[in-house]
Amino acid sequence: MKRIRRDHKVRRFHQAKWDEPVIFELHRPGERGVIPPGTEAGIAEAVGEGSARIPSAMRRKEAPALPEIGQAKVLRHYLRLSQETLGSDLNVEIGQGTCTMKYIPRINEMLIRSPNLMELHPLQDAGSVQGILEIYYKLDQAMREISGMDAFTFQPSSGTQALLAMASIVRAYHDSRGEGDQRDEIITTIFSHPSQAATAAVKGYKIITLHPDEDGFPDLEKLKNAISERTAGFVVANPEDTGIYNHRIREFTDVVHEAGGICFYDQANANGLLGITRAKEAGFDMCFFNLHKTFAAPHMCGGPATGALGVTDSLKRFLPGPLVDWDGSRYVLVEQSGDSIGKVRSFHGVAQTVLRSYAWIMSLGPDGLKNVAQIAVLNNNYLYHKILQIRGASAPYIKGRRLEQVRYSWKQLTDETGVTTEDITRRMCDFGLHYWTSHHPYIVPQPFTLEPTESYSKEDLDEYIEALTHISNEAYTQPHIVKLAPHNSTVHRNVESSLDDPAKWCITWRAYLKKTQPE
Amino acid sequence: MSEHRTYAHPYIPNTAPEVREAMLKEIGLSSIDQLHDAIPDSLKLKRVMSLPPAMNEYELRRHIEALLAKNKHGADYINFLGAGCWQHFVPAVCDEINQRSEFVTAYAGEPYEDHGRFQSLFEYQSLMAELVDMDVVNVPTFDWAQAAATAIRMAGRITGRRIALISRSVDPDKAKIITNYCTPVMEIRYVEIDPLTGKIDLDDLQGKLEEGTAAFYFENPGYLGVIEDQGAEISELVHAVNAISIVGVDPISLGVLEPPSRYGADIVCGDLQPLGMHMNYGGGQAGFIATRDEETYVMEYPSRLFGIVPTEVEGEYGFGDVAYERTSFALREKGKESVGTQTALWGITAGVYLSLLGPAGMQEVGETIMQKSQYAANKLCAIPGVSLRFKDTVFFKEFVLDFNETELSVAEINKRLLEVGIFGGKDLSSAYPQWGQCALYCVTEIHLQTDLNRLASAVDSIVCKNQKTEE
């Protein structure tokens, strides 16, 4: 037999295409998916019909118009939809820069499925949950070492919620000093996550957004000009979305502190820094880590997740409560004092994520964590070196090395071919790869942000580079292929005009049936 | 293979020395430390972090399993704790779907690579819409408290007013979350409940509604278990001052209870955890928000809203973001509140749950819960000194037991129940000191008659033993 030739450079991929109906179309009257637990005869005899006592105003008159579907059909439907979803497990997911899409260890997924976690009620007596409290406590200790902060809470259930908690702490701190009304501004930077500005605005702050200098660094002079007696706080990531590390960060935090402001550090993504440098030495009063980014918890289609929030001693009293502590003989939940911001999420946050990240740290140890930072930066600089060789791609700002990610630009490619970064997003789907443009606004024209993390091998990175190179060549030779993409996906391009039109948008199936007419 | 070679860490392939060296060389470096040259020496950590050494997979498994074994859980014990997180039946298909690798590890994919994620969440929105009888439902937010807080902020923007009234019977912890989220942009004021019935005090509500009132938020069934049957009157009073009626609801009650849209609610919110999520020590919570399909409301959601659209090919369903320009993703601080990672996987799971249960299942589960909770309450109230706090008010799955006449504290009773393998109800004595020793008990479809009998006889023996000792 002749050996099968496999010398194609890009993956010949096709996404699952099940042509699945919407679940309501699977409805067949009389079918059942599951029978919930029922009532024993003894109970029914004793109390009769349970709903008989419902006051008539409150008794449901019309059953909800849910579909009736047999169990196998429900399972098959959702399995098919899962196959039509490209999770990070299935692709070289370096295209979602800023989000640290790393390998999700399977042992951790197995461990969270223990009934010793799944079946715990959050209000159980502390004596009956010593195991999970120990995990919270030990993760807190590890986070303190990694950041230099003095206390952590795992209550915030995303980076956005951690930022909201931080903005709340800033307000509580200034209120406690009688300066809450006077200090009504928070300063951030344009290359930081949109949630920094958005959550500060939720807490009633005016937002001052600093733009970078010509090398892409946050501009210290602009910060000095923005600082005043109205400054409540300064929130920033470092590196920002550009991957450029601000080596003068300590001067920034000093300037803010001199003016009486709080410095809080968005370390959602700290992947290039573990064991290398910490929030404390850079002068921050607070920081948070996204456990679903740097600490290897999965993203779950967008949560549930954890934004682990750490503070220095002087801000500990403002943290949401309760906090986990060790009283010398057992782990306890300690309520916070009246200075606390109260709570930001019910109970104790997302325990599964806390367990996963504790397990991940334990599987790496101090040397392994430092290896993570080193290889994440190595992978990124390798990728950076190669991407700059692709026709039409560039990386604005300083030419030196970057840390864990880079914000690139296709400006030249767009100018020369008309192919945009959005077109490339769709075309990358055809190779089984995820690619994301960037956060808005597009300060870098035609942007894309790549973050290879430590998880991917050199061959994985080469595959991604090869796909982008292939698309660049297409843009210069057959641009229609890119512009009309995707070709190998579950579906073709959306006709999106209705999504922004109140008369036409359909956010539910029932709205779709009301707002569309059969031909 | 040489015995002495250095292998890569299983999670970090490029720690293999020859690969690492080749990559360094490719980018013109000679040492791995040069990668972090941008960081000033003064900021570098010049020691090895003080953390435990790395474990291999088996060591890790034994270590974590030993820690978790210290927990006592609701599958081995009989659990009567609810108060915002409830033990319900979880169909196996729910776990099968939400443990799928594709869903567990997906995140921010486009409608083309993640068609299934978009469709599943659109279907979730659509199924919840039927349950609450409204036309718009969001991609889920963090939890019920966040959903209520956002509903209140939406009402503030829609009305241009800054005072929100909330019922005194809202869980005090939930009220903390709402208050923190709304301060300082809005002001939260309480409306009292009737101490005898647990229902909203309509006179107090009427007295507090004014021109500056943006909304009134109440729950049904409420935190204290009570079914509020004055919903229509409440909404009428609220609408009379052009304020917005917001109702929080436990969705598992909606097979038997009227959805709030039918008694005047403009915004409905609640928690999805009862619909297929394990308790997970509180990690199963997820909040939903629902409204009518009116631009005024839709444009105030901070959340993602997935919509169905045609594609370029006839016969294909496409999905995408509705009115994306509302969001903080598009507009930073000028967007509506903020959006980001929330609880999407629980939304998908709740969709699976509703597909499995269907209309009959939802009706049956509601009916079963009410029978069992009434049975438990009757049994418990037959014990001398134990009574219902709200004697004449119908409840759904939770009810407040008054232990004052037993002369035992709830803490003492719960301690003794734990000794016999029972998690007693939530102690309300610190949150509601005016009621003395009361506890919030939760009974659901998962409890067997024998479980309920065991609870009653355990409480009976604790209470009666105490009374005998006193004699």
Image (spheres, rainbow, N blue to C red):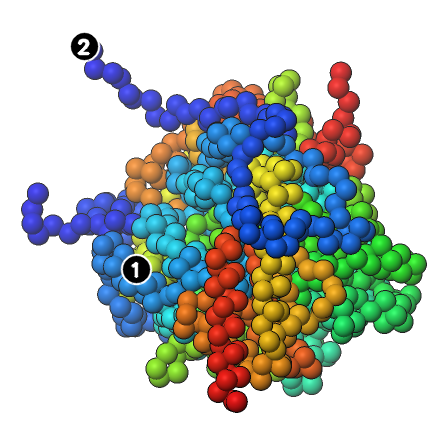
Question: Which quarter of the picture shows residue A370?
Answer: bottom left
Chain ID at mark 1: B
Q: Dot 2 lies on which element?
A: loop
Mark 2–mark 1 distance (CA, rounded to whole Å): 51 Å
Which residue is under mark 2?
A1
Residue shown at the point (71%, 69%) measured from the top left? B390
Which class describes the residues within 10 Å of circle 1: few (<14), some (14-19), or many (20+)?
A: some
In the displayed structure, A264 sits above or below A301; it is: below
Tag 1: residue type? Glu
In the displayed structure, B306 sits above or below A118; it is: above
Residue shown at the point (67%, 45%) measured from the top left? B255
Residue A496: percent from left, percent from top: 68, 31
Position of the N terminus of chain A, as image quadrant, is top left
Position of the C terminus of chain A, as image quadrant, is top right
Along the line of sight, which residue is nearer the eye, A2 or B219? B219
In the displayed structure, A490 sits above or below A162; it is: above
Does the image show residue A56? yes
Residue A234: percent from left, percent from top: 59, 70
Along the line of sight, which residue is nearer the eye, A325 or A279? A325
Q: Dot 1 lies on which element?
A: helix
Residue A318: percent from left, percent from top: 57, 78
Tag 2: residue type? Met
Which residue is under mark 1?
B65
Q: For the residues tagged 2 and 1, is the chain the same?
A: no
Residue shown at the point (65%, 86%) measured from the top left? A177
Residue B426: percent from left, percent from top: 56, 70
Chain ID at mark 2: A
- Which of the numbered marks, if any, corresponds to residue B287? none
Of all residues shown, which one is farthest toward the bottom?
B471
Along the line of sight, which residue is nearer the eye, B297 or B191? B191
In the displayed structure, A277 sits above or below A69; it is: below
Of all residues shown, which one is farthest toward the top?
A1
